[in-house]
Image (tube, helix red, strand yellow):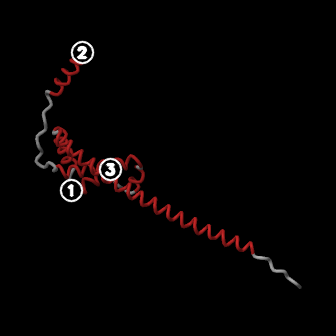
Amino acid sequence: MKKLFYIVICLFFSCNSGVEKPKKPENVIPEEKMADIMYDVFLLNSAKGVNKIILEVNGVMPEKYVFEKYSIDSTQFAESNNYYVYNTKTYESILNRIKEKIDLKKKEYEALDKIEEAEKKKKADSIRAIRSKEKDSLLKIGELKPRVNLQ
């Protein structure tokens, strides 16, 4: 088992020794903007995974939309992403920003969901109250004595 461990470690270092860290591109996307871009990419990819047909029907191409929104091209994004991937602390910082944004949005949507549920409950309660009044009035009509026709 120890021999296998050492072999794996040696292979790992030998494979990584020839890989050069990419140089900082001239048009590198700033960290904050990169976090915003990746956040949008994650959201759109999730939406595409949930209901791809709606996006296709509306003609939304997620990658094209993000590139146009942030005025970047695919090459600039790829080079910047490659640069940040090799700078793990910076990349981790970007991913933490994305996670914070997702958590914040999740809390906002949960709060909106609670408000919506409360409104639905209030509406259902008012409908229930109206229906119970209708039943009461029908009971009163049934209590009326019929008129006798004396002809």
Task: Report which residue position mark 2 lands on.
Answer: 2
Please tell me how crowded label 1 is: few (under 14), some (14-19), or many (20+) other residues with Cα within 10 Å: few
Q: Earlier in the sequence, mark 2 or mark 3?
A: 2
| Farthest residue, direction right | 151
Q: Give the amino acid type for the residue marked by disc 2 in the picture.
A: Lys
Q: Which residue corresponds to the image point at 74% horizontal and 72% vertical from the top-left?
A: 142
Q: Quadrant of the N terminus?
A: top left
Task: Please state the horizontal and vertical placement of residue 150, each as a whole percent of the image.
Answer: 88, 84
* Residue 131: x %, y % from top left: 61, 67
How far apart, in angstroms, are the residues tagged by discs 1 and 3?
Answer: 18 Å
* Element class at badge 2: helix
Question: Residues under labels 2 and 3: Cα distance?
Answer: 44 Å
- As helix, strand or loop, the secondary structure at mark 3 comes to helix
Element type at marker 1? loop
Q: Which amino acid is tagged 3?
A: Leu
Closer to the eye: label 2 or 3: 2
- Residue 68 image position (x, y, % from top left): 25, 56
The x and y percentages for residue 15 are 18, 25
Label 3 Cα crowd, 10 Å radius (few <14 / some 14-19 / many 20+): some
- Pointer 1: what residue? 71
